[in-house]
């Protein structure tokens, strides 16, 4: 996947997530959305470095990867309550296939753990974004309502 497309997809997720928060009434759904927004925020930090609008900083990349991994670890617990809200983008199939859903969240955490300390140069960012993007897409395609 080309870096520009990766950045576009990350921006779309961040924008749609921010817009989706408006009017959410269920606190558990809001907590899930906040967790996903935190991941999008960290992806944006890495994306700016990839795009060249922020200086490449391997320590900042590792910090972003750690934050993404921390949020990924929380995902199954955030979705344990079968909370719903009209603004939720979670498909009901999550709770029917919760083990697979959890495995996909855990895969994101595993990818970020694997990549920490490995991103030493700016050209390493494109494969990082591609790998994380594929992991996110694997879950979103099946378990998130698309626009």
Image (spheres, rainbow, N blue to C red):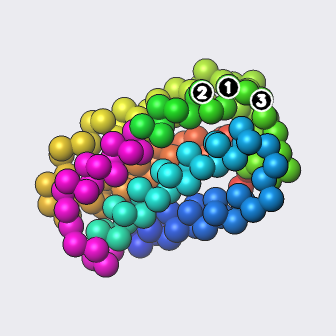
Badge 1: residue crowd in 10 Å (few <14, some 14–19, many ≥20): few
The tag on residue 80 is 1
Q: Main secondary structure of the magenta part?
A: helix
Give how far apart the Cα atoms at labels 3 and 2 are: 11 Å
* Contact? badges 1 and 2 (CB < 8 Å): yes
Locate the C terminus and report the quarter of the image it occupies. bottom right
- As drawn, 118 above or below 11: above
Magenta residues (range): 51-69
Residue that appears at 41% across and 56% down: 42
Residue position marked by numbered label 3 in the rendering: 82
Where residue 86 sits: x, y (%)? 85, 50
* 65 inside magenta stretch: yes
What is the secondary structure assignment of the residue under circle 3?
loop
Q: Nearer the viewer, residue 117 or 139?
A: 117
Give the spatial CA distance, label 1 vs label 2.
Answer: 5 Å
Question: Splitting the image into 4 quarters, where does residue 51 fall?
Answer: bottom left
In the image, what residue occupies the spot 80% across and 59% down?
Answer: 23
Q: Circle 3: is it few (<14), some (14-19), or many (20+) Cα within 10 Å? A: few
């Amino acid at each position: 996947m080309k870096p520009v497309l990766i950045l576009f997809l990350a921006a779309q997720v961040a924008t749609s997530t921010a817009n989706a928060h408006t009017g959410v009434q269920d606190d558990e759904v809001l907590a899930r959305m906040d967790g996903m927004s935190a991941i999008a925020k960290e992806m944006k930090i890495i994306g700016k470095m990839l795009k060249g609008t922020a200086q490449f900083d391997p320590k900042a990349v590792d910090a972003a990867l750690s934050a993404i991994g921390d949020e990924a670890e929380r995902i199954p617990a955030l979705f344990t309550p079968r909370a719903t809200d009209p603004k939720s983008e979670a498909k009901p199939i999550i709770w029917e296939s919760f083990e697979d859903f959890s495995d996909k969240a855990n895969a994101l955490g595993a990818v970020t753990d694997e990549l920490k300390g490995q991103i030493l140069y700016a050209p390493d960012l494109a494969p990082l974004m591609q790998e994380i993007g594929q992991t996110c897409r694997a879950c979103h395609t099946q378990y998130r309502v698309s626009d």
